[in-house]
Image (cartoon, rainbow, N blue to C red):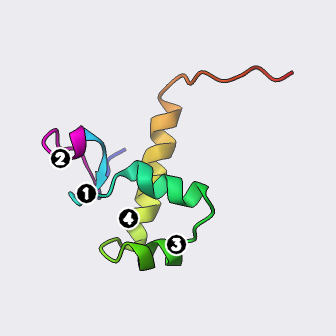
């Protein structure tokens, strides 16, 4: 899968995945969604973002998690 809105530059933000070369990490956007913020609220707080940026950040995060083994607690 390719991402047209996600950039990784080792000279910017320590090389973490960001939105369109902006200093807005994908993790920040995904975290705001996880905290219950809606797209409209995120776009108000970050006017440089576009709605498709948010959606691509979620697709990118979904794929990143799919590709890794995460240490999870066993269900009791």
- The answer to whether the residue labelled 4 contacts the one labelled 3, judged by CB atoms less than 8 Å apart, is no
Which sits earlier in the primary sequence, circle 4 or circle 1? Answer: 1
Q: Which residue is mark 3?
A: 39
Question: How far apart are labels 2 and 4 at the CA level?
Answer: 18 Å
- The answer to whether the residue labelled 1 contacts the one labelled 2, judged by CB atoms less than 8 Å apart, is yes
Secondary structure category for the residue under label 1:
loop
Question: How far apart are labels 1 and 2 at the CA level?
Answer: 7 Å
Question: How far apart are labels 1 and 3 at the CA level?
Answer: 18 Å
When the figure is inspected, residue 17 is found, relative to residue 72, above or below; the finding is below
Query: Horizontal placement of 37 versus 54: left or right?
Result: right
Where residue 71 sits, quadrant-wise, is top right
Which sits earlier in the primary sequence, circle 1 or circle 2? Answer: 2
Residue at position x 58%, y 67% in the image: 37
Q: Which residue is mark 1?
A: 23
Question: How far apart are labels 4 and 3 at the CA level?
Answer: 10 Å
Mark number displayed over residue 12: 2
Mark number displayed over residue 67: none
Question: How far apart are labels 4 and 1 at the CA level?
Answer: 13 Å
Q: Which residue is mark 4?
A: 53
């Amino acid at each position: 899968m390719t991402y047209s809105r996600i950039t990784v530059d080792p000279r910017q933000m320590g090389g973490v995945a960001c939105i369109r070369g902006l200093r807005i990490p994908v993790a920040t956007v995904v975290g705001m969604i996880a905290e219950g913020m809606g797209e409209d609220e995120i776009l108000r707080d970050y006017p440089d973002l576009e709605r498709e940026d948010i959606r691509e950040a979620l697709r990118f995060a979904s794929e990143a998690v799919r590709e890794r083994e995460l240490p999870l607690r066993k269900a009791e």
